[in-house]
């Protein structure tokens, strides 16, 4: 069955630096992969979706890459700010391109220090 | 739009009691999902509905868990009888075809 690994449980960086989070999957290559942000006591909030035929996607200070050969997605936050501190989750469809039936990684908790 | 609304936010109950969690999805969304989150296992999909019909309940842990969606604007997740290992945060999420998931803020369940 498909498994997702987010390599770091926690990542601490200095304000202004680039945070890079990793998501690896083990089995089939999904049609797309999503990243979510979760703050304490709140539900995950969607950030970005990248499709299998896209190498890179950007949104403001966020950048996501998708390498189907390595079975890996990287999530970058440039010029990080303390307000970026949260847990970031990657998710992919359980079965191929199935609508919304997502499995999630356990997340990486990012702390940005001023 | 108020987003996905879950109630209660917190529930503390004793082992053996029945627990009912409630969810109001975003209007117009035709998919509804119930997830459970724990430190050990992360976010796990329990069941999802499309147009009020259960599509996949393979994530439901056991017969003590049941979910219903009587109409497009309401869903319940029931645990009867509850056990301490059911303690977790339960999230409801909704979406429409091709859109990402919109999560509620969850119900934190503690079973003593």
Image (spheres, helix red, strand yellow):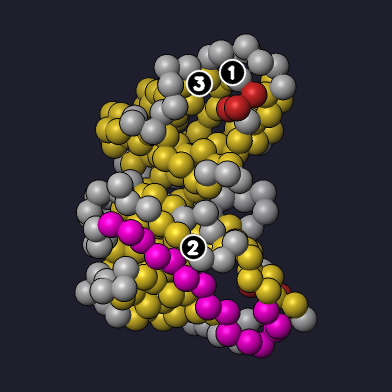
x and y percentages locating residue B55 in the rendered image: 27, 33
Q: Position of residue A55 (x, y in %)?
A: 30, 80
The residue identified by callout 3 is: B78
Q: Residue at x 52, y 82 (%)?
A: A61
Front tag of 3 and 1: 1
Q: Is the same chain shared between marks 1 and 2?
A: no
Q: Chain of mark 1?
A: B
**Is disc 3 in contact with disc 2, using a CB cutoff of under 8 Å?**
no
Query: Which callout, 3 or 2, points to the residue nearer the camera?
Result: 2
Which mark, residue B82?
1
The residue carrying pointer 2 sits among few (fewer than 14), some (14 to 19) or many (20 or more) residues within 10 Å by Cα, namely many
Query: Which residue reaches farthest right?
Result: A114
- Element on which disc 2 rests: strand
Q: Which of the 4 quarters of the picture holds residue B100?
A: bottom left
Residue at mark 3 to residue at mark 2: CA–CA distance? 31 Å
- Indicate yes or no whether the magenta region holds residue A20: yes
Magenta stretch in the rendered image: A13-27
Under tag 1, what secondary structure?
loop
Q: Separation of disc 1 and disc 2 at Cα?
A: 31 Å
Image disc number at residue A6: 2
Q: Is residue A101 visible?
A: yes
Q: Secondary structure at mark 3?
A: strand
**Label 3 crowding class (10 Å Cα cut-off): few <14, some 14-19, many 20+?**
some
User: How far apart, in angstroms, are the residues tagged by discs 3 and 1?
Assistant: 9 Å
Decide whether residue A52 is among the magenta residues: no
Residue B107: mark in rendering: none
Query: Predominant secondary structure in magenta?
Result: strand
Mark 1 vs mark 2: give the one in front. 2
């Amino acid at each position: 069955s498909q498994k997702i690994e987010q390599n770091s449980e926690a990542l601490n960086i200095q304000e202004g630096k680039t945070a890079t989070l990793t998501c690896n999957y083990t089995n089939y290559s999904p049609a797309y992969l999503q990243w979510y942000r979760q703050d304490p006591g709140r539900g995950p909030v969607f950030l970005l979706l990248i499709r299998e035929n896209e190498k890179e996607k950007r949104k403001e200070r966020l950048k996501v890459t998708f390498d189907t050969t390595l079975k890996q997605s990287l999530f970058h936050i440039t010029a990080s700010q303390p307000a970026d501190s949260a847990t970031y989750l990657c998710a992919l469809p359980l079965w191929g391109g199935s609508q919304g039936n997502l499995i999630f990684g356990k997340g990486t908790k990012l702390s940005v220090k001023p | 739009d108020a987003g996905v609304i879950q109630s209660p936010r917190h529930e503390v109950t004793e082992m053996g009691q029945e627990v009912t969690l409630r969810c109001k999805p975003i209007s117009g969304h035709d998919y509804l999902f119930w997830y459970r989150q724990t430190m050990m296992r992360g976010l796990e999909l329990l069941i999802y509905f499309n147009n009020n019909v259960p599509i996949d309940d393979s994530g439901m842990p056991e017969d003590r868990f049941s979910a219903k969606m009587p109409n497009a604007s309401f869903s319940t997740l029931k645990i009867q009888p509850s056990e301490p290992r059911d303690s977790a945060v339960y999230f409801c999420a909704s979406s429409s075809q091709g859109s990402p998931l919109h999560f509620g803020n969850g119900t934190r369940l503690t079973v003593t």
